[in-house]
Image: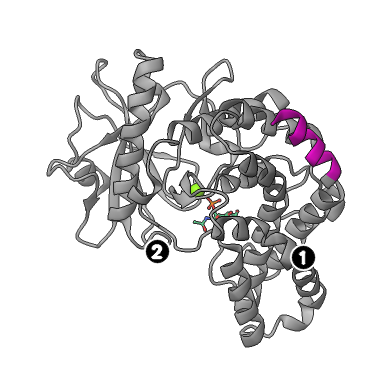
């Protein structure tokens, strides 16, 4: 089927212009459907990657539940801007939230949010603050949505215990014969394993609650308005039950790094304390009233856990022979592992500062 034929399966209003490829995102494919009728919106058509997301109907069920919940809150605070501050899922003509084509691909349509800005990364603390505040507001709006009603899209996604078990399995198999190159990295990972299970254990003991979490809180998953104020959280694919530390920790991991996620020059990789403070401040300004003291105390561990968990995931993929992440060349996963370990080590060296900043803000 052509993209136009697929678009025609959805309950769209107006008359659609020529389909345009919409850049951004490493996992799904997106197309913008411009509307020639001025009184109807443009749409965003997306093919959801069903290799990464094994149960797309469940994913879409979560997305409907969460967007309905969030919309009801936004309608209260911003009655005129509901469609700009939350995602709108446009159903298929048969009423389902997705369309499955004859080849087995899953498609969905969202209302396109006009005049937005996206930041792939930033060194501007005001943008960092706004992004974090917007993610935190999302967490807050979902505070009263029972996590038991939301399905698990990727089992054990942020389960550190399971990630370590998987890594040890990959070490044992040494499928790609690369273990000899990563002895130092494995040693470091093992030396920190106990500390990195702190959050997992708090969760197991029920001391931090399961919430509905986003699980991919990079700054490019917030849309901003023209005044650089946060508008709307996007990319709801990984929403599932989790701990608040996931959304804080992955935000810190992606935002505060002064280098790249896969920087080969480790001297460039460090945790920027001003960006850390800006992110923590924005996140806590919108979650302070809903988080427990134990959750707040756990945030500082999340700042180390997420670079560490990401290095474990890259290291495992390197040992497995590059089966999960797309790579540029055959050292890519090793370079990524080292960069994320450097970020972990730098965070660890700054632990007292991180604690002081969170203590002051919490
Ligand atoms: C993947 O493709 P992207 O950037 O949204 C991964 C994340 C990792 C990230 C590392 C479903 O996310 O968990 O943190 O790469 N998503 C999945 O860059 O595995
Ligand atoms: Mg994503």
Model colouring: one colour
Q: Quadrant of the C terminus?
A: top right
Can residue 169 be seen here? The reply is: yes
The CB of the residue at mark 2 lies under 8 Å from ligand 1:
no
* Left or right of 39 in this view: 149: right
Residue drawn where x is 60% and y is 77% of the image: 320
Q: Residues within 10 Å of mark 1 (few under 14, many from 20)?
A: few
Magenta stretch holds residue 355 = yes
Find residue 359 and name its label: none
Q: Main secondary structure of the magenta part?
A: helix
Residue drawn where x is 54% and y is 72% of the image: 323
Q: Are marks 1 and 2 in contact (CB under 8 Å)?
A: no
Query: Which residue is under mark 1?
Result: 192
Percent x, y of residue 58:
30, 54
Tell me the CA gap for discs 1 and 2: 32 Å
Query: Which residue is under mark 2?
Result: 51
Magenta extent = 352-362
Percent x, y of residue 182:
77, 75
> N-terminal of the two: label 1 or label 2?
2
* Left or right of 52 in this view: 99: left
How many callouts does the rendering have? 2
Magenta stretch holds residue 157 = no
Percent x, y of residue 32:
36, 35
Residue drawn where x is 48% and y is 49% of the image: 210
* Left or right of 245 in this view: 213: left
Report the residue that reaches farthest toward the top: 80
Q: Secondary structure at mark 2?
A: loop
Percent x, y of residue 38:
27, 16
Q: Residues within 10 Å of mark 2 (few under 14, many from 20)?
A: few
Quarter of the image for residue 71 reads top left
Can residue 321 be seen here? The reply is: no
């Amino acid at each position: 089927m052509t993209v136009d034929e697929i678009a025609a399966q959805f309950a769209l209003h107006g008359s659609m212009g020529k389909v345009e490829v919409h850049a951004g995102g490493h996992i799904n494919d997106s197309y913008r459907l411009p509307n020639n009728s001025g009184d109807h919106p443009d749409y965003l058509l997306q093919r959801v990657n069903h290799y990464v997301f094994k149960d797309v109907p469940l994913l879409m069920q979560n997305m409907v539940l969460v967007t309905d919940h969030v919309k009801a809150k936004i309608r209260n605070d911003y009655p005129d801007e509901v469609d700009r501050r939350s995602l709108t899922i446009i159903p298929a003509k048969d009423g389902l939230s997705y369309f499955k084509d004859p080849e087995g691909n899953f498609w969905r349509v969202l209302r396109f949010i006009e005049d937005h800005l996206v930041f792939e990364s930033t060194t501007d603390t005001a943008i960092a603050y706004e992004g974090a505040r917007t993610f935190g507001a999302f967490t807050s709006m979902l505070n009263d949505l029972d996590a038991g009603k939301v399905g698990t899209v990727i089992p054990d996604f942020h389960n550190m215990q399971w990630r370590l078990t998987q890594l040890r399995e990959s070490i044992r198999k040494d499928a790609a014969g690369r273990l000899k190159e990563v002895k130092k990295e494995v040693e470091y990972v093992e030396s920190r394993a106990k500390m990195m299970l702190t959050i997992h254990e708090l969760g197991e003991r029920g001391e931090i609650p399961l919430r509905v979490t986003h699980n991919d809180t990079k700054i490019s998953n917030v849309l901003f308005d023209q005044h650089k104020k946060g508008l709307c959280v996007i990319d709801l694919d990984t929403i599932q039950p989790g701990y608040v530390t996931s959304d804080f920790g992955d935000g810190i991991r992606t935002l505060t790094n002064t280098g790249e996620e896969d920087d080969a020059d480790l001297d460039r990789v460090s945790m920027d304390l001003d960006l850390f403070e800006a992110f923590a401040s924005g996140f806590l300004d919108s979650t302070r009233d809903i988080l427990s003291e134990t959750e707040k105390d756990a945030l500082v561990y999340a700042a180390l856990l997420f670079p560490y968990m990401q290095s474990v995931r890259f290291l495992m993929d390197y040992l497995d022979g590059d089966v999960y992440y797309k790579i540029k060349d055959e050292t890519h996963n090793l370079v990524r592992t080292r960069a994320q370990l450097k970020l972990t080590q730098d965070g660890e060296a700054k632990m007292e500062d991180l604690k002081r900043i969170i203590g002051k803000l919490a």
